[in-house]
Structures are given as C-alpha cells and as structure tokens.
Image: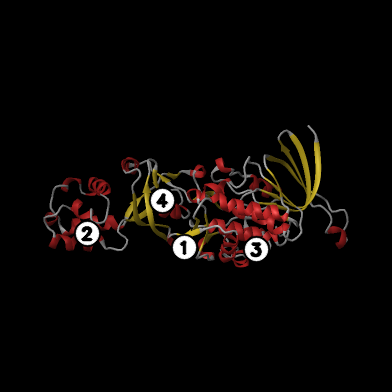
Amino acid sequence: MRQTSTNYDVIILGAGAAGLFCAFTAAQRGRRVLVLEKANKIGKKILMSGGGRCNFTNQFVTAENFISNNPHFCKSALTRYTQWDFIALVEQHGIEYEERSHGQLFCKGSAKELLNMLLKECHSAGVEIKTHCEVQVIKALARENNSEKDEAQNNQYQINLLREKTRLSFKCQSLVIATGALSIPTLGGSGLGYDIAQQFALPVTERRAGLVPFMFSDHMKSICERLTGLAVSAEVSCNGQSFAENILFTHRGLSGPAILQISNYWHPGNPIIINLLPNISASEWLKNAKQHNGKSLLKTLLNQYLPKSLGNELQMLWWPESSNKPLAEFSDKQLLLIGEQINHWELKPSATEGYRTAEVTLGGIDTDCISSKTMEVKQQPGLYFIGEVLDVTGHLGGFNFQWAWSSGYTAGLFV
C-alpha cells in the first residue's frame, strides 16, 4: 500500500454540521483546510433530521436551552454567531423555510438544500473534503524551535489514516475534532472524539443517550402496545423540569417531543409525571360534572378531552369495577383520586431506547479544559473541539444545530 504526505493549515475530523461550518469559516480567512470524514457520505445527520427537512435553528436561542456541567460555556459562541446570522445565510442562498411551534425553523423543501449550501460555501472557499477516512493515529509533533516567526509555520499534528486500502499521512497546524458523539451509530455516531480526548489526557464527563424515547417493562408495556401510534398533548415532568407538548405511544413505550425533552433530565430509577389535562384541575372538573352530568359515564366524559382508546385504558387502570357506574354514584373521594391521577400520572420507565435512536449524546469533553472564546484546548495549543462531542447538549427544536453552527464558526475564526 502506497503512502502519501501533505501539509495543511487546518485539518477537521468530521464532515457534519459543525465540521463543515468550521471548514469554510477558516478557509474564508485564507487557511488551507482539509476535512476528513469516515463515512461514505457527508452530512448524514443533517439529511435525516426533522423528518428530512432539518430543524436547522430556533427563533428563541438562549443559554437556558442547553445542558452542560458549565451552563455559561456556550454563551460566548452563541453570541458570536447567532440564529439570526444563520438565518441570514439560509436566506442568502435562497432556501425557503418555515416556522413551526416553539420557534422551530425547518426547510420548506428538503434538508439536501441546507447540506448543499454548506458544501457550496466549502467549495467556493477552497475546502478539500475526503470521505472513507479511517483515522488510525494522531501524533502531537514536537516544536522544532521557539522563535515566534517559525512557530507559526510549524506543523503541530500528524494524522495517519487508511482510505480505501491506501495509507495516508497529513500534517497541520490546527486540528479540529468535530466527530460528533455516540448517538445513532448508523448515521456515523462514534466515540472517536472521546478517544482523542483520552490520548491528550482531557477529562470527559459521564455520557448517556439524550432526546430519546422511553421503554417500559411493567403494565405500561402492554398499554403502550395497544395504543401504538396515538399522540396526545400533555405536560411531562421529571427532576424539577417540565415540557408541554405531544407524547406518542409506541410499541416499545413512549416517545414524542415532550418525552424526548424530558429524557435529558431522567436518570434510571426516576419516575416521570404525565399531566394529561395540563390546563385543567381534573378533580374539580369531575366534581362539577358529577353535579351537572350525573348520568354520564366517566369514560364518556373523558372523551371530551382525551382519545377514546386512551380513556378505555385509563378506565381499566383506575376504575375497572365502576366502568358502568354513572358519575352520580362515584364518591367525591373517588373522583378526587381519579382526578389526581389524570393530572399526576406517575410512570417508571425501565430504560431509554439508548444510543440507537437517541438524537443526541448528553455529556462529553469537559468544557473546563476548553476556551469558550476559541474552542481550543487550554493546555494543548492547536487542538480544538466543536459540536456534539463537547459537554453541551441542546433541547429539542433546532438548538443542537445552532450549537454546531456557533461552535464551528467560533473555532473557524481562530484555527
């Protein structure tokens, strides 16, 4: 197998959202940039996100939309490159988009338009991109001298890789790790970034699947199987956090936006609380209905707000022996209890579906060792980490893409 060697100013590992954005930002400054991607295609996660329409940012981006051991770390990059900056770029390329609930912005057409925009920017800036690259060794190179003038010209890193049975070796002044994380391995998720962090003795926080559906092993499993495909609006709470949006019953358990959001705050063993009527005190409503609609069945009354199939399941769960009893025959105490259960349905997931379906990975490279102003490792000059590999995780709704754009842009200014 033949071997080649080439020098670049900047090498970026990973051709996802953060990597591509960093690449053309750096190249527009006159830097010679090479992007190395292990997959056969570029931007797979961009193409599949938002049902193929890519929820590329959100109208309302704040640091509060992100989870990190250091909640202040993301502020600098998010301020340096805002959602409005990205929206302006999308408009500049003539991509039509639409706003959905909670300020989410999606492509009106296809996510391909967004990926093509990034690739056009890379092409016009002279970025080189290579796919099918399996990184084997990364070496930090010793400085040849200490003079400031020569130091700027010295390569700091060497990357040895295998590409279609050919061994390649590249050197660079700045190395950017934009390898993503563990979520959805079929779209390129991997732990390479954490391996690189370990090589350079950088701390990595505990990682787990985020924005991920729940599974159940108790009686809820069969309930979810019977209700598969049903979506209802609800408020879901766990560990002091709440999200009000749809929940979706699946053959494995619960999914939908509110469930995915709360999964970021759930730990094994925690209960989750589902409020099926978030704007109504169900106990008061039922007591009032007893006075005015005493002949009605409780299940019939619930059909005003909840799907019939869900009402049937709740009846089997909470008042099976009174299924044919009119409301007037329920005691106030019974109705109070049922009302509390409707507003405070406590469930214990057995697990999440894990990285296989998780949209993000919680945790990552500890931000204490990274400069929030440049994304450079504080004690390792020329090494940068951006995007999902860092311990910064956004809520559902375009925030993780905004973090990719903002962190990629920030590093691109300094590599």
Mark 4 element type: loop
Q: Are marks 2 and 1 in contact (CB under 8 Å)?
A: no
Answer with mark 2 or mark 1, whichever residue precedes in sequence: 1
Disc 3 from disc 4: Cα separation: 33 Å
- Of the numbered discs 2 and 3, the one sitting upstream in the chain is 2
Give 39 or 138, whichever is nearer the viewer: 39
Q: Is residue 382 above or below residue 354?
A: below
User: Which residue is located at x 60 percent, y 49 percent?
Assistant: 180
**In the image, what residue type sits under mark 4?**
Gly
Q: Which residue is mark 4?
A: 256
Please state which amino acid type lies under the numbered disc 2: Leu
Seen in the image, is 36 located left or right of residue 145?
Answer: left
Q: Nearer the viewer, mark 2 or mark 1?
A: 1
Can you identify the residue that label 2 sits on?
336
Q: Position of residue 209 (x, y in %)?
A: 51, 48
| Residue depicted at 69% across the width and 56% down the height | 24
Q: Is residue 287 visible?
A: yes
Q: Would residue 122 be found to the left or right of residue 359 on screen?
A: right
Counting from the top left corner in percent of width and height, residue 224 is at 34, 43
Q: Judge the density around disc 1: few (<14), some (14-19), many (≥20) Cα neighbours within 10 Å.
A: some
Identify residue type, mark 3: Ser
Which of the two marks, 1 or 3, is nearer to us in this view?
1
- Which secondary structure, mark 3? loop
Disc 1 target residue: 103
Task: From the image, tell me which residue sits under label 3.
Answer: 372
> Of discs 1 and 4, which sits in the foreground?
1
